[in-house]
Amino acid sequence: MASKSTIDPSISPLKPTFDSDGSHKESDHLKAVIAKLGLQSHVEGGYFVETDRDSLRIPNPFPEGIKSSEDTRSASTTIHYLLTPRSPLGAFHRNKGRTVHTLHRGRGRYILIHADEVASASCPGGYGGAEDMSESERWTGKARVETFIVGQDVLNGERIQWIVDGGKYKCSFLLPDEEVGKESEGLLISETVVPGFEFADHDFMRVERMEALVTGKQKEEMGWMLRKE
Ligand code: GUN
């Protein structure tokens, strides 16, 4: 292996498999899937449709945070989410709610930055609990970064279900369907957010936050995963 990832030395540096410049055309199959499921472009990249929003309203469990928010939330929401060769990147963002992901088809790589574990005055990346700690209890080091592949090859460690707790930054990008080759018919998953999704509970990672949370070398490797502003 020529060089090693700064996130996981057992793999090569993370690079996009498919350019995010829109130069790929959707296949007829993917166009039909997008139409049949009623998917729309997502601000994170990729496509989505909300398939369920629980009519049960629950008290908003989140402390006042990054944006002002209402008193209640839907108990849960569920979406389909699709990455394609034309829109292959779900850019780094976080939700306050916990998200349960289930794979339907395809392969992709996920990267998590555990910002919630390092909230502090000098690294203000978390929500709730950690903010309540005294200055001496807080850890001001860099955040833990985790990466894994989602796909059907469970015997080789690929995941078919993955849970991301609130307050963690998440990014995903499309991988080819097979280890060798460049073809993909998309990564299609379902995501259930608890409590239900609201934009008030969502924010994108900005470059300054990435620089605060990860090492310079990790920033070099992951900079392309930030949303283009
Ligand atoms: N509207 C825009 N993005 C989302 C999302 O990720 N989930 C839900 N439920 N609605 C959205």
Image (cartoon, grey):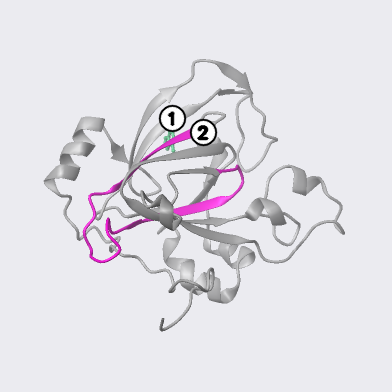
Tell me which corner region of the image, top left, top right, bottom left or bottom right, holds residue 73: top right
Amino acid at dot 2: Val
Q: Position of residue 88 (x, y in %)?
A: 31, 55
**x, y percent for residue 26:** 18, 50
| Amino acid type of the residue that numbered disc 1 sits on in the rendered structure | Thr
Looking at the rendered image, the quarter that the N terminus falls into is bottom left
**Ligand 1 within 8 Å, label 1 CB:** yes
Q: State the extent of the magenta-drawn residues as a range.
A: 164-192
Q: Nearer the viewer, residue 154 or 42?
A: 154
The reply to whether the magenta stretch includes residue 196 is no
Classify mark 2 as within 8 Å of ligand 1 or not, answering yes or no.
yes
Ligand 1 visible in quadrant: top left
Name the residue tied to disc 2.
193
Residue 170 at x, y = what percent? 51, 52
Q: Callout 2: few (<14), some (14-19), or many (20+) C-alpha neighbours within 10 Å?
A: many
Q: Quadrant of residue 95?
A: top right
Q: Which residue is mark 1?
A: 78
Residue shown at the point (72%, 66%) measured from the top left: 141
